[in-house]
Amino acid sequence: MRICKWLGAGVTAFAALALFAAQLGLFQGAPPSDLGVRDGRLKPPSTTANSVSSQALLWPDHPQRENAWIAPLALRGDGPATMTRLKALLQAQPGVSIVESRADYLYVQYTTRLMKFVDDAEFWFDPARGVIEVRSSSRVGRDDFGVNRQRIEALRARLAAS
């Protein structure tokens, strides 16, 4: 009984400390300095299981090549019109901050409400392929438990319905 009380108090104290640290922004991680489109490519996916990329297959020796691959977003009209729709959908989502917006490129940050984790997502209209290439990655941790994939798939469904 006494051990259970100590254990319960320890777990409660740890949870309170973690929540306090999160509110101070200690789980946000540093923004990547190498995002954007270079030579028709977004940044490669993370080497750990915490990202998705529609261009993952472009890196044949990448350790997360198959796990990170996700289909690009289909156009709804032309590229600029799709990017405008995409931007409106992203602006309507809680926890989304648009960092960079151009006619062919969007960079957004997703911040979780409670723990303040930040994920970086990029969307690029590739005129050669006629799709929206996408990359979404967690800043911290080794596994995102499928959050980035679920987020992009939900966005894909909203885009298709718009």
Image (cartoon, rainbow, N blue to C red):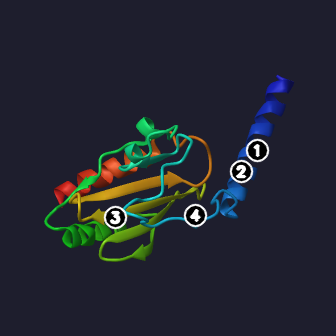
Q: Mark 4 sits on what residue?
A: 32
1 or 4: tag closer to the N-terminus: 1
Quarter of the figure with residue 13:
top right
| Of 127 and 5, the residue lying toward us | 127
Above or below: residue 86 compared with residue 54? below
Tag shown at residue 14 = 1
Q: Disc 3 designates what residue?
A: 124
Q: On the image, which quarter does residue 65 sit in?
A: top left
Q: Nearer the viewer, residue 90 or 39?
A: 39
- Identify the secondary structure beneath mark 4: loop
Examine the rendered structure and indicate whether residue 161 appears above or below residue 67: below
Name the residue type under label 3.
Answer: Trp
Q: Which residue is mark 2?
A: 18
Q: CA distance from mark 4 to mark 2?
A: 24 Å
Mark 1 or mark 3: name the one nearer the start of the chain: 1
Q: Residues within 10 Å of mark 2 (few under 14, many from 20)?
A: some
